[in-house]
Amino acid sequence: MKLLTDGVILLRATAADGAVNAFARAVAEDDEAAYAEALAILLREGMQDSFAEYLAQKILRDGSLFAERAYTGKEDAATRAAMAHDLRLLQRLAEKTAFLPPRLSALTDDGMPRIGYGEDDGLFGPRWDSEHTLDTLAEFFARNGYGIFLGNKAFSYENGALRPVRNTSRVLPADLKDYAEEKRAVEGNIVSFLRGLPYSDMLLYGDKGTGKSSTVHAMLNKYADEGLRAVELQKDQLGAINAVKELLSSLPFRFLLFIDDLSLEEKDEKVTSLKASLEGSMNEKSENVMIVATSNRRHILKENFSDRENSVHARDTMEEQLSLSDRFGLTVCFSSTGKAEYLSIVRQLAADAALALPAGELEALAERWAIAKGGRSPRRAKQFIDFAYACLAKGEPVQF
């Protein structure tokens, strides 16, 4: 059995898609079961009347060599010809929706729902393999990225591969109040990284709720259009850190390798992996990977009380702590907020939210909130403003 998709060169992921493969089998074999399989997938996606558009969306997210080279500006004639060949085959497949083989045609005439061609996608035009379409696609990939990086800026690392994180924070630097010097240091380092200038791996440390992680998210959102992406590693994945760096090294993006809320036991084997990745091994600093960690403690390593009883061991522990934290070229302290700083953040957030509360009442409520919730911090301020906004939007008094 020969399928229309058998000759696809670059768009293999599209050809292997469930609906695409099932439809190709259906028209090649006049197979009702395969047609029903394709129809079921398209119905779930709401695309049963628009198979051409469904195919176009799969092509855009295929991560093909053409897309990658278009993004990097290294498109060549051979890759372009292979892409044109694949687009021609896939458009012919879509056109089969109007010319079903005898058995399928009879079944659809008898009431079985029919898969429709729909309208050509705006990027593809009436002839998918035309020079105009290839130019349009190349411009699209150059502007937006390709494959899993199209529309995704944050990723996790699972089973040796990147997995997109769909629901990411939308915070921007302007949403984070005060801490101007801290944000300036982080942003300056990231701009150097993006421009191919010397940069440093970063450790952001300080009390919880002071905006360390939010600052990283804000910078990612601000600079995603310039090719910045982030991969978050959990603490138990630190042993794979060099493998992740190797995976990322061949990709045409700049990655923040993000380790949130990092703390390690002194004898944890992950300490060795992290130290080697920061500096001092064959897998040291990569051109397109910056390690960014946040921690509640400056020296990352936990020290047990019993460690302090032996002065020799205490000295060794301190040296181990310093040898790890000092390998981050840039350390930025996010200090805790006092009452004045906390209320300053509250007032700025309230102004952004157009919160209809008199200044005196706003500050009194914010102070009560901080006492009730166990302290002052930017996180507490944001939680209070969100709560107050919701109360007022419902026409209720701000009570807690």
Image (spheres, rainbow, N blue to C red):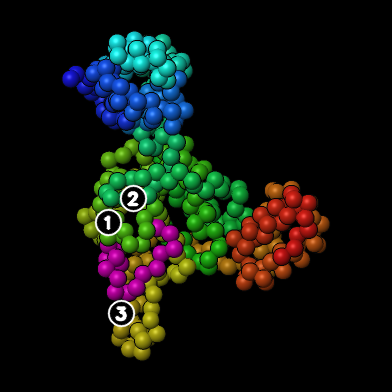
Outermost residue on the front side: it is 110
Q: Residues within 10 Å of mark 3 (few under 14, many from 20)?
A: few
Q: Position of residue 338 (x, y in %)?
A: 65, 69
Query: In the picture provided, is 288 more to the left or to the right than 379?
Result: left
Q: Which mark is residue 157?
A: 2
Query: In the picture provided, is 235 more to the left or to the right than 218?
Result: left
First reached walking from the N terminus: tag 3 or tag 1:
1
Residue named by callout 1: 240
Q: Residues within 10 Å of mark 2 (few under 14, many from 20)?
A: some
Residue at position x 29%, y 65% in the image: 270
Outermost residue on the left side: it is 1
Image height of 261 relative to 141, above or below:
below
Q: Position of residue 312 (x, y in %)?
A: 30, 86
Spatial CA distance of label 3 from label 2 is 34 Å
Secondary structure, mark 2, is strand
Do the numbered discs 2 and 1 sit on residues whose CB atoms are within 8 Å?
Answer: yes
Do the numbered discs 3 and 2 sit on residues whose CB atoms are within 8 Å?
Answer: no
Residue named by callout 3: 316
